[in-house]
Amino acid sequence: MRIRYFAWVRERVGRAEEEVQPTTPIATVADLADWLATRGPGYEAAFADRNRLRVAVNQDQADFTAHIAANDEIAFFPPMTGG
Amino acid sequence: MRIRYFAWVRERVGRAEEEVQPTTPIATVADLADWLATRGPGYEAAFADRNRLRVAVNQDQADFTAHIAANDEIAFFPPMTGG
Amino acid sequence: MTVRIQSEDFDIAAELAALFAGRDDMGAIVTFSGLVRGGDVTAMTLEHYPGMTEKALQKIEAEANARWPLKATLILHRVGRLLPGERIVLVAAASQTRHAAFEAASFLMDYLKTDAPFWKNEEHADGTSAWVDARKADSSAKARWR
Amino acid sequence: MTVRIQSEDFDIAAELAALFAGRDDMGAIVTFSGLVRGGDVTAMTLEHYPGMTEKALQKIEAEANARWPLKATLILHRVGRLLPGERIVLVAAASQTRHAAFEAASFLMDYLKTDAPFWKNEEHADGTSAWVDARKADSSAKARWR
C-alpha cells in the first residue's frame, strides 16, 4: 500500500510518502488510519482528530469508510485550501 | 436648444445634431418631440413611436415628461445596446 | 476607478497591470471581456454619445463601489467599426474576496448594457446592416440588482 | 478545456489569446485572478498532490461544461512559494452569453476552493508560518450549486 501525506499531516508524520505493509487486517481507510496512528507520536498526532482529515483513494476523494486493497494509493491531508 | 440624435433616430432625421428655436411653446420633452415631428417626413418617422425612443436631458437619462429650458441639450435615441 | 472610451484595441494584461501596479491588497480580480461574435455578422459599428457615456459609466462605477468593498474597478469600451473576434468591452472589479469581485463585475455589465449610451449597428454577409435591438433579457438582468 | 499546474508566473493576455485564437464564436469571457494578499503575510507556499490535482480540476471543468454552454474553459494554478501581489490562479470561462460565463467562472472557483488538492502555508512578518485553515464560507459557497 502506498501512503501519501500532505500539508500539516505530512509535517506531523515526518514524511511525504511511504510503502506500508500493515500488520493488522485492513478493510477500510479507517482501519488503515487506526494502524498508522500506532506507528509513533508523529503519526498519533497526525491522526488524532479525523474530523480535520480528508482522504483520497487512488487520487479520488473518498472517506474513512471506503474499502481499500493492497495496490491502492491512499492519501491523508487537511481540507483543501486552493484558489 | 441643442438637439442630438443617435443610431436610427439620427439616420431618420438625417443629422446628428442641430440648434432649434421651436415656434410653439415648449415646456417638456414631449412638447419638443411633438414640434420636431412636424419638421418633415424623416422627423415624423423618427418620432412615430415614442415607446421605442429614449431621452437624455443635459446628458442624463430623462423621460418625455421632463421639463426643459432654452439652454438645455436634449438627445433622442433608441434603447441602449452597449457591452 | 477608471473609465475609458476609445476606438483602439486594448491589452487586457497591460490594463490590469496598470490598475493594480504596486498594490498587494486585492486578492480577487474578475474581468469580463465582450467580443464581436461572427457567424452572420461581418462587422459591427459602435456609436456612442460622447460626454454622456463617460458620465453614465462613472455613475455605474460609483454605484458598484457603493455596493461592494472594491479595491479597484475598470470600464473600457471601444467605439467605431469592429470585426468578429475583436474586443468590445473590458470590465474589471477587484476586491479582497472573490464573491464581491464576481458580483460587482456582473453588476457593472448589467448596468452598462442598459444605462450607457452605446448603440450597435451590425453588417451582414448579404450586404445589409441593421441596428441591434435592446434585449428584454438585459433589462431583466439589471432588475435583479434593485 | 485546459488545466495546468505550474510554478512559473503566467501572462493573462497570452493565456486568453492562446485559448481563443482563431475563434469568433464566443461573445463573453469571464476571468478570475487570485493574488497573494500582503499585510501580515510575507510569503505563501502552495503544496499540491500531483496527479490528483489535474484529475480533480478536469472533473471540475467537465462539470462546468455540462452545466453551461461553454465555448472554452481554462484553469491555471501555481504552486510553490509566492510573494504578496503575485498571481496564484487564473480561471476563465467563455460562452456566447455573459451570464453563463459569469456563473461558470464563479462555479469553477467555488469548486476549486473545496475540491482541488492544494494547501496554503503562510509566512508571517514575525518569522512564524502556519497552514491556512479551510473556510466555512468556501463550503457554503460550493453548496449553492447543488
Image (cartoon, coloured by chain):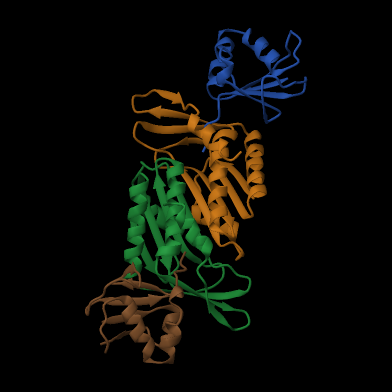
Chain colours: A blue, B brown, C green, D orange
- Residue D47, relative to residue C137: is it above or below? above
Residue displayed at 41% across by 51% down:
C93
Whether residue A25 appears in this view of the structure is: yes
Q: Position of residue B26 (x, y in %)?
A: 27, 81
Marker count (numbered) = 0
Q: Is residue D38 left or right of residue B24?
A: right
Q: Position of residue D32 (x, y in %)?
A: 49, 48
Q: Position of residue D2 (x, y in %)?
A: 62, 49
Q: Quadrant of the N terminus of chain B?
A: bottom left
Q: Quadrant of residue B75?
A: bottom left
Q: Nearer the viewer, residue A3 or B75?
A: B75
Q: Position of residue C51 (x, y in %)?
A: 31, 71
- Residue C141, relative to residue D135: is it above or below? below
Residue displayed at 22% across by 80% down:
B70
Q: Is residue D145 left or right of residue C46?
A: right
Q: Quadrant of residue C13?
A: bottom left
Residue displayed at 47% across by 47% down:
C102
Whether residue C21 appears in this view of the structure is: no
Residue displayed at 54% across by 39% down:
D110
- Residue C116, relative to residue C94: is it above or below? below
In this view, which residue lies farthest toward the bottom? B40
Q: Nearer the viewer, residue A24 or D78?
A: A24
